[in-house]
Image (spheres, rainbow, N blue to C red):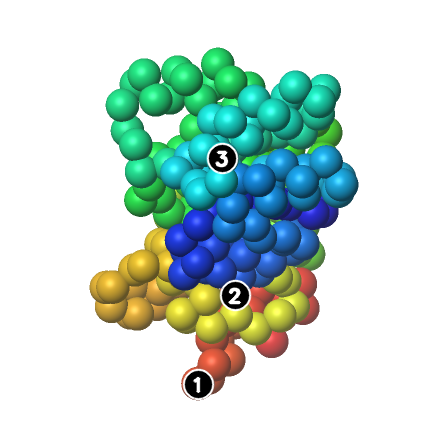
Amino acid sequence: MRLLVVEDERRLAEALKWGLEAHGFEVDVRHDGLEAVQAAETNVYAAILLDLQLPGLSGYRVCAEIRRTGNDVPILMLTAKSGEYDEVEGLDTGADDYLTKPFSYVVLVARLRALLRRTGQAPTQVVVGDLVVDGAARRCSRAGQRIVLTDREFAVLEFLGEHRETVVTRREILEQVWGWDFVGQENTVEVHISALRRKIDQPFGRHSLQTVRGVGYRLSGQDE
């Protein structure tokens, strides 16, 4: 599934590209409003993440130009502006949703998936053995029994589920769930992993949430 990220702050653009690719998306990046319009005209995207303050053309103008051509691709505006009139203007020019910086990957990916679900493009469930993680319903169950998770626990589990059978590092989990600019302690991840084990594994006699010593964690359908 291919996305277009339009962001003139290059460090943030690369972080968004890396993070979204880690969630399985293909990502094109443009740093200029005119280039963004051209990219939208010549490529088919599942969605566009569009900053407002851009060289060439503003995000408002880019959105208006894309809509003027009849392109109904979902557009999620990203902006440092937080005024309600800015949000109204963005939506009035054709944006589907609006996210104010700074934001976490949890919120960004959730908003993006919501847009994709509206167009029938996003899968709603991750299944690992008898564990089901339903992103649309924000619901987790194992062997048909519902498991209650906090929002952060769900986000960690969902990320691991998207990369099932693959080892992900603590740093990758931090950047994807807490945000690329997270500056806290990495043991935050260990605390949430422990909480998840107590909920999704121990009551069911499973060992699906596995530690790979010195590397990170893996969610597997095959118990160790």
Question: According to the image, label 3 marks what residue?
Answer: 57
Outermost bottom residue: 214
Residue 204: x percent and y percent?
54, 56
Locate the C terminus by quadrant. bottom right
Query: Of residues 217 and 81, which is closer to you in this image?
Result: 81
Outermost left residue: 184
Kindly check if marks 2 and 1 are in contact, taking CB atoms under 8 A apart as contact.
no
First in residue order: circle 3 vs circle 2? 3
Q: CA distance from mark 2 to mark 1?
A: 15 Å
Question: According to the image, label 2 marks what residue?
Answer: 209
Q: Amino acid at mark 1?
A: Gly
Q: Residue at x 37, y 47 (%)?
A: 104
Residue 198: x percent and y percent?
41, 58
Q: Is residue 23 above or below residue 4?
A: below
Kindly check if marks 1 and 3 are in contact, taking CB atoms under 8 A apart as contact.
no
First in residue order: circle 1 vs circle 3? 3
Q: In the visual, does 202 lie left or right of 145?
A: left
Q: Residues within 10 Å of mark 2 (few under 14, many from 20)?
A: many
Q: Amino acid at mark 2?
A: Leu
Q: Residue at x 63, y 52 (%)?
A: 28
Q: Is residue 69 above or below residue 121?
A: above
Q: Residues within 10 Å of mark 3 (few under 14, many from 20)?
A: some
Q: Amino acid at mark 3?
A: Leu
Q: Secondary structure at mark 2?
A: strand
Question: According to the image, label 1 marks what residue?
Answer: 214
Q: CA distance from mark 1 to mark 3?
A: 47 Å
